[in-house]
Image (cartoon, rainbow, N blue to C red):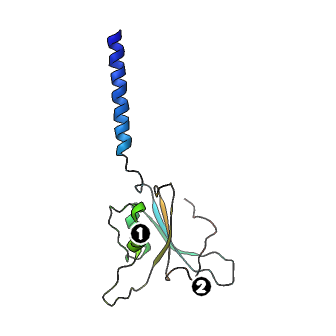
Amino acid sequence: MKKKRLVVALAMLGVIAIGIALIAAIPWGTSNGMHCYALLSPVTPGTNEASTILESGCYDSFAESIEAATDGQVKLDATVRPQDVTDEMLEPEAYPSGMVPNLSTVIGIDYKDTNYAGSSYTWVVSQAGCSDVYSYGVSSMPSG
């Protein structure tokens, strides 16, 4: 009887060890889920109107979503995790003249889960971002 208990105890310890190993192998903070973006219009000065979503799209990867959101001006490596993104990474690639045509600026990224995990929603504008002249706002997140 003692031998059977020992075998059961060892089997339980083995299952626990495998479970801990599997949990440790989970790539926390990776970008699972759908990754969407929305191109916003500026709010009309002097009004309380919300921005209009001019264009939107959803992709399976964070890198694809950022590339689409910026009209191909920002190309993140597929291995870049959302928590590793910096402002510098979101800078458009300059053309030989130093000018960037059709500038798209990322003004915010929302994540479904904590630690930059789960689905993401990227907000972009066609100007250089928020300023005294341009402001943006939405009344609620898009459905989904």
Q: Position of residue 126 (x, y in %)?
A: 49, 81
Occupied quadrant, residue 5: top left
Figure quadrant of the C terminus: bottom right
Residue at 39% of width from left, 63% of height from top? 84
- 69 left or right of 137? left
Upstream in the sequence, badge 2 or badge 1?
1
Residue 136: numbered disc: none
CA gap between label 2 and label 1 equals 24 Å
What residue does disc 1 label? Answer: 86
Q: Secondary structure at mark 1?
A: loop
Asked if 126 appears above or below 118 in the picture, the reply is below
Mark 2, other Cα within 10 Å: few <14 / some 14–19 / many ≥20 = few
Q: Which residue is mark 2?
A: 132
The residue at 32%/18% (across/down) is 7
Q: Is residue 118 above or below residue 105?
A: above
Look at label 1 and name its amino acid: Thr
Left or right side of 46 for 67? left
Q: Position of residue 139 (x, y in %)?
A: 64, 68
The x and y percentages for residue 109 are: 49, 66
